[in-house]
Image (cartoon, rainbow, N blue to C red):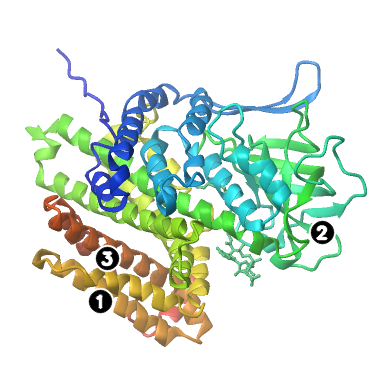
């Protein structure tokens, strides 16, 4: 009988995740633990079972843009994949946005929401994208203090009823700038006529004209967007933040044309569109300037999502690769019995655990701030760790997905196994929501606030201060040394702008990896103290052996001269 390889399978994605079950026991409120575990168990089962199977069946389906109806009317409909339609219902019912706003678990409500998404997202084909933007829009409107818009949109954005829940877009990117948003060309004109006979939360006193070049998940009922009120100056300060309701009462787009869907390398289930705004009615959210500053809460929430989704994508890739290692035999034994294969899996497992803990720590800090429980020190730390978590985990996600695919040999390169999507979908993570370089510079800006660097170093030294076990001595020392090295570099580079900028990525990545190692080591100590076994210690030790400190020690002028030589060649 001919040989056919059994494909990888997934079990309960909560129960099978040792790190997450430990984390839940360590961090979540003890009096709610059994209820929370039941919920995570349930979602973990859906993720590894029903929704994973549905995802595999859904592989060939992609969103379709229908510009015209049969009678020649411009309709600009987007038909999403069957799994996305189910994801919309599930997201509302499971509170994948709502959980962060209901306050059920106090300042840990944000962490709870992140855990739910961490468990289910890898089976929902990047439906996390509209959810992230919806969450970001809710946070931004709440922070704006605009009561009319809050009353109109928040109950919808955070609803658990699939028939009521809205998703939101985040229309920022234009042809002039994905990163340099301040160059946006969309113009806002004040109109004397409100656009609706039935007033809603907004006054719709403005009309927007321009092209939005890359609008992810253009299926939302509303969007937050930036435009330059006529007569305003250049840059991000001359832009203003606007609220747009996309459809009129009969469901037609309101002076918005969908030019086309983007033909992307990954996230192909996400209907990313190019839009023309041709007099789109819009409501000013705060004031007619400082749009970049006012949309920053959205950036920070979606960057946290990016980090959580990077971590959950890594976890999915490793779970599949580990299962496969038990099923696949070569050269006489299963891959799981081959020392080199096990070593490879250990490395990506440790990277994944570091990413999970960094993303969750960032969520803890955001949750504290949202619950009004963060002191100044924690607020600074949240601001600094958000770009660091996003940029560090984004890079890890690509590397881990690539390594995991290799664990399947040729099958990892064949589209109908579903495996190549892991890598293609991971590749967006360092790109959207701020590239690695842009966020490295943002890290420097965040650290420039008074007290921010002290908040960061205190995070590392306080957590490491709790580590006592001899088997954690090495990882604790590596973390302490790399923090020291990064601090030294920053002190030397201070005031030399070109040096600071050229080294910003190595610095930010070093800090990100140092914080990950710190959190792994701290978590491992807790596991030892609570008789959870040596697994977490092994993760910390393995992570410490992967490169943590990326700072270049050469003379800064020499590094820069070499970089120019290499660029010009
Ligand atoms: C898996 C799920 C993931 C989520 C999926 C979401 C899909 C959505 C896809 C997208 O939409 S991707 C597009 C996202 N675009 C970006 O992330 C833009 C990246 N570029 C930057 O972040 C630039 O640094 C930035 C646009 C902010 C630079 O613009 P400017 O005009 O040069 O702004 P400037 O002068 O640096 O900052 C203006 C103000 O905002 C300053 O405050 P003040 O006015 O009080 O001085 C800044 O401090 C503040 N600010 C900027 N970034 C901030 C911030 N405040 C808090 N947090 C931040 N992150």
The circle drawn on residue 100 is: none
- Distance, label 2 to label 1, CA atoms, is 50 Å
Q: Residue 555: x percent and y percent?
A: 37, 85
The residue lying at 30 percent from left, 53 percent from top is: 27
Looking at the image, which is closer to me, 410 or 105? 105
Q: Which residue is mark 2?
A: 229
Residue denoted by label 1: 481
SS of the residue under disc 1: helix
Please give the label number shown on residue 518.
3
Q: Which residue is at 74% across, 61% downward?
A: 239
* Residues packed near mark 1 inside 10 Å, few (<14), some (14 to 19) or many (20 plus): some
Q: Is residue 331 visible?
A: no
Residue 113 vertical placement versus 562 (above, below)? above
Q: Where is residue 269 shown, x and y percent of the image?
A: 52, 33
Quadrant of the image occupied by residue 256:
top right
Give percent across and percent down for residue 390: 44, 57
Label 1 CB sits under 8 Å from any ligand 1 atom: no
What is the distance, in whole Å, between disc 1 and disc 3 at their CAs?
A: 11 Å
Instruction: Quote the CA–CA distance across marks 3 and 2.
Output: 46 Å
Residue 175 in view here: yes
Q: Is residue 220 above or below residue 532?
A: above
Name the mark nearer the viewer: 1 or 3: 3
Picture coordinates of residue 213 (x, y %)? Answer: 67, 47
């Amino acid at each position: 009988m001919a040989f056919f390889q059994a494909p990888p399978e997934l079990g309960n994605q909560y129960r099978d995740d040792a790190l997450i079950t430990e984390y839940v026991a360590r961090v979540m409120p003890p009096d709610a633990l059994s209820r929370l575990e039941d919920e995570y168990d349930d979602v973990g089962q859906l993720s590894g079972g029903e929704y994973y199977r549905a995802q595999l069946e859904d592989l060939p389906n992609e969103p379709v843009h229908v510009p015209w109806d049969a009678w020649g009317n411009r309709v600009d409909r987007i038909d999403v994949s069957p799994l996305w339609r189910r994801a919309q219902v599930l997201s509302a019912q499971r509170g994948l946005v709502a959980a962060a706003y209901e306050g059920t678990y106090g300042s840990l409500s944000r962490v709870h929401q992140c855990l739910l998404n961490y468990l289910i997202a890898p089976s929902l084909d990047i439906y996390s994208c509209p959810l992230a933007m919806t969450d970001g829009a809710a946070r931004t409107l709440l922070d704006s203090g605009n009561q009319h818009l809050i009353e109109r949109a928040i109950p919808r954005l955070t609803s658990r009823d699939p028939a009521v829940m809205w998703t939101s877009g985040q229309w920022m990117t234009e042809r002039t700038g994905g990163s340099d948003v301040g160059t946006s060309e969309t113009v806002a004109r004040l109109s004397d006529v409100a656009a609706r006979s039935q007033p809603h939360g907004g006054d719709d006193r403005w009309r927007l004209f321009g092209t939005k070049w890359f609008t992810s998940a253009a299926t939302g009922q509303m969007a937050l967007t930036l435009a330059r009120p006529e007569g305003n100056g250049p840059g991000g300060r001359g832009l203003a933040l606007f609220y747009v309701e996309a459809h009129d009462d009969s469901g037609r787009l309101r002076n918005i044309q969908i030019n086309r869907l983007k033909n992307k390398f990954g996230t192909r289930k996400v209907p990313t569109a190019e839009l023309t705004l041709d007099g789109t009615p819009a409501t000013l959210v705060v004031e007619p300037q400082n749009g970049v500053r006012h949309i920053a809460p959205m950036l920070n929430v979606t960057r946290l999502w990016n980090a959580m989704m990077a971590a959950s994508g890594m976890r999915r890739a490793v779970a599949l690769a580990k299962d496969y290692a038990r099923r696949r035999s070569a050269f006489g034994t299963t891959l799981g019995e081959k020392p080199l294969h096990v070593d490879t899996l250990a490395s990506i497992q440790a990277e994944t655990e570091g990413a999970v803990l960094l993303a969750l720590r960032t969520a803890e800090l955001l949750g504290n701030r949202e619950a009004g429980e963060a002191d100044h020190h924690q607020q600074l730390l949240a601001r600094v760790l958000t770009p660091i978590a996003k940029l560090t985990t984004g890079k890890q996600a690509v590397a881990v997905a690539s390594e995991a695919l290799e664990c399947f040999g040729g099958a990892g390169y064949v589209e109908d196994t579903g495996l190549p999507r892991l890598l293609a979908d991971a590749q967006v993570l360092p790109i959207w929501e701020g590239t690695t370089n842009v966020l490295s510079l943002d890290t420097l800006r965040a650290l420039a606030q008074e007290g921010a660097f002290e908040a960061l170093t205190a995070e590392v030294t306080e957590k490491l201060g709790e580590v006592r076990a001899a088997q954690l001595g090495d990882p604790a020392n590596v973390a302490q040394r790399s923090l020291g090295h990064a601090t030294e570099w920053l002190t030397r580079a201070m005031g030399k702008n070109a040096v600071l900028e050229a080294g910003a990525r190595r610095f930010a990545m070093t800090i990100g990896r140092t914080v990950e190692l710190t959190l792994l080591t701290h978590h491992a100590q807790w596991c030892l103290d609570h008789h959870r076994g040596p697994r977490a210690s092994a993760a910390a030790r393995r992570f410490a052996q992967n490169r943590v400190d990326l700072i270049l020690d050469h003379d800064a002028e020499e590094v820069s001269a070499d970089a120019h030589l290499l660029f010009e060649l």
